[in-house]
């Protein structure tokens, strides 16, 4: 694919790197900014952009004290001709975070931006600007698209290890110069405390940077906020955030393992047993720490469509908020399913209206891989497939309805991307192999984790006829990042032919598997 160059990225990021270097660990560990600080406001947590389209995008920052957020944009690094955007007043009600929406941007162009934090009592007093850059989506098909996806960060007790270089996978991802990064959930592990050291099977020791908020499971709003701040202690991630826009979805670990609405926890680590209470606090922190276009809506929903020009629409699902309770998942009727009726209706409508060549369904859980939930000692199911290879049951009924809809509405170019299971694989779903046959063939690609424990490959369920064309996974459970098995995926869409190429990559960027898909086919 002929891809647009990324001009001057290294020098553009100097402001962000300087801010990162100035962030000392003791200051970073504090649960809230100190109001007695002298000097000017600082943005030591870096900057992020999210949900970037052809003409808009969101810019995020966190201050170390109350401040007014100001964003300046320019076509050049010099900022000689810049446009100024006045953002919100950052205060304790949002943990001193804020997001500013940029509108009316030129399509297919490199946007240089810098964030200034102004003293609310004296607007002339601003802190050192923090810089970043991103590309808007192109309205011209010929420009092509490259994006990455993965998920699962700082899970199973494997946090930021300074001996390991921190989250080094972000350097390999940044080197590919993607238009955006899709995080398929588990951005944090609110239920996973991080200790200062972990003994490894070979007798060596894994060391973690630790914080007070990561010393226990998150229950309070302050603890959830501290979980999101923890990852921003990593310079690799902050550098990546300053150069690559994100599309963020959530899964279970932003709240607690395998959660569903109405659940009452039996986990002795929690004093707050209501998952609904925990989810409300987690959602607030999630909305504060990521630039997401729909979270400020009255319904505050995570599911949304992010349009990326004529080649691509990304349909971001939420398989947590509207699901029914985890069970054996073998019921013969299931109107609620894993998406809920309203989200399923929305997805059908958005797919029908889409005119993009490719329609990526960003699913936070896989379809045909069996993901159990044995937390209460029962053989319950966490995802969709329950291991029965026959006709659809339980949550499979809702997926069958969606696949049937795609076939009969002749919706072309659907591809499913997911993470969650902590290995990488490619599954092709084919009616001739399936118990349920009223659908067109399609692909599902799995990647992750980014920095978490790796696990053996999940069992397949034959209801939709998946064939595992490729898999890389350990044979042992909870293999540390030092043992490898950390993965991300890449998608290239050629602007001339319309071909979509998926590459499954490992931590250093090495390609493990490649699949080329042709445009214009129902399903895929």
Image (spheres, rainbow, N blue to C red):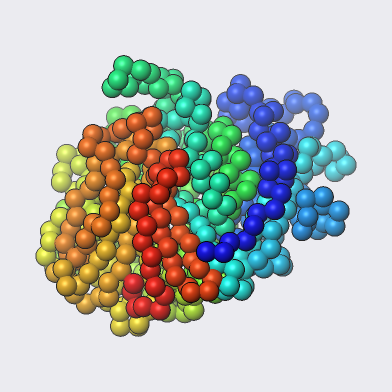
In this rendering, the answer to whether 222 lies above or below 253 is above
* Residue depicted at 20% across the width and 72% down the height: 431
Q: Is 127 or 75 nearer to us in this picture?
A: 75
Residue at 51% over, 46% down:
173
Residue nearer the viewer, 339 or 274:
339
Where is residue 226 shown, x and y percent of the image?
52, 34
- Seen in the picture, residue 203 relative to 483 is either above or below; the reply is above
Residue 373 falls in image quadrant: top left
Q: Is residue 134 visible?
A: yes
Residue 163, placed above or below residue 143: above
Which residue is pictured at 86% across the width and 53% down the height?
80
Q: Position of residue 416 (x, y in %)?
A: 36, 63
Q: Choose between 94 and 459: the one closer to the eye.
A: 459
Q: Is residue 258 left or right of residue 94?
A: left
Q: Quadrant of the C terminus?
A: bottom left
Q: Is residue 216 left or right of residue 137?
A: left
Left or right placement of residue 346 versus residue 494 in this view = left
**Residue at the farthest front position:** 2
Residue 337 in which image quadrant: bottom left
* Residue 99 visible to an observer of this rendering: no
Side (left or right) of 419 relative to 382? right
Seen at 42% across and 52% down, the residue is: 489
Q: In the rendering, at what x and y percent does residue 76 appear? A: 78, 55
User: How far across and how far down the image is residue 286, in percent?
Assistant: 51, 46
- Residue 17 sits in which quadrant? top right
**Outermost residue toward the top?**
203
Count the marks.
0
């Amino acid at each position: 694919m002929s891809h647009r160059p990324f001009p001057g990225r290294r020098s553009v990021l100097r402001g962000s790197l300087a801010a990162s270097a100035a962030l000392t660990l003791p200051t970073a560990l504090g649960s809230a900014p100190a109001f007695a600080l002298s000097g000017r406001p600082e943005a030591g947590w870096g900057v992020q952009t999210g949900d970037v389209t052809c003409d808009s995008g969101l810019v995020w920052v966190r201050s170390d004290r109350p401040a007014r957020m100001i964003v300046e944009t320019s076509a050049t690094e010099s900022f000689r001709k810049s446009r100024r955007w006045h953002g919100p007043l950052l205060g304790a009600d949002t943990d001193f975070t804020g997001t500013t929406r940029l509108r009316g941007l030129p399509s297919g162009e490199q946007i240089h931006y810098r964030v200034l934090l102004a003293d609310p009592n004296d607007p002339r007093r601003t802190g050192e600007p923090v810089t970043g850059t991103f590309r808007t989506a192109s309205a011209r098909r010929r420009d092509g698209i490259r994006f990455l996806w993965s998920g699962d960060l700082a899970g199973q007790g494997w946090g930021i290890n300074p001996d390991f270089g921190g989250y080094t996978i972000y350097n390999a991802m940044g080197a590919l110069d993607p238009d955006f990064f899709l995080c398929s959930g588990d951005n944090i592990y609110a239920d996973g405390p991080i200790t200062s050291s972990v003994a490894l099977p070979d007798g060596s020791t894994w060391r973690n940077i630790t914080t007070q908020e990561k010393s226990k499971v998150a229950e309070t709003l302050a603890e959830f906020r501290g979980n999101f701040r923890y990852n921003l202690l990593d310079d690799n991630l902050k550098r990546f955030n300053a150069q690559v826009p994100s599309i963020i979805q959530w899964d279970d670990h932003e709240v607690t393992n395998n959660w569903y609405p109405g659940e009452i926890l039996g986990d002795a680590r929690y004093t707050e047993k209501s998952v609904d209470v925990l989810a409300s606090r987690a959602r607030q922190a999630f909305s504060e720490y990521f630039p997401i276009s729909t979270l400020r809506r009255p319904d505050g929903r995570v599911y949304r469509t992010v349009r990326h020009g004529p080649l691509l629409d990304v349909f971001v699902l939420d398989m947590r908020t509207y699901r029914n309770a985890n069970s054996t998942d073998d019921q013969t009727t299931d109107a609620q399913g894993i998406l809920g009726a309203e989200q399923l209706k929305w997805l059908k409508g958005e797919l029908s209206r889409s005119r993009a060549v490719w329609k990526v369904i960003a699913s936070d859980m896989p379809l045909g891989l069996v993901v159990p939930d044995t937390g209460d000692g029962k053989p319950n199911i966490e995802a969709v497939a329950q291991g029965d290879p026959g006709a659809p049951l339980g949550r499979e009924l809702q997926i069958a309805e969606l696949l049937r809809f795609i076939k009969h509405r002749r919706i072309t170019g659907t591809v499913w991307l997911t993470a969650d299971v902590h290995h990488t694989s490619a599954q092709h779903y084919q009616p001739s192999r399936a118990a349920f046959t009223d659908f067109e063939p399609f692909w599902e690609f799995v990647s992750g984790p980014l920095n978490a424990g790796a696990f053996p490959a999940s069992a397949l369920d034959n209801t939709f006829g998946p064939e595992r064309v490729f898999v890389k996974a350990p044979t042992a459970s909870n293999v540390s990042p030092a043992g490898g098995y950390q993965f991300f995926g890449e998608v290239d869409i050629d602007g001339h032919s319309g071909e979509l190429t998926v590459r499954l990559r490992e931590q250093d960027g090495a390609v493990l598997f490649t699949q080329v898909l042709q445009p214009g086919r129902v399903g895929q």
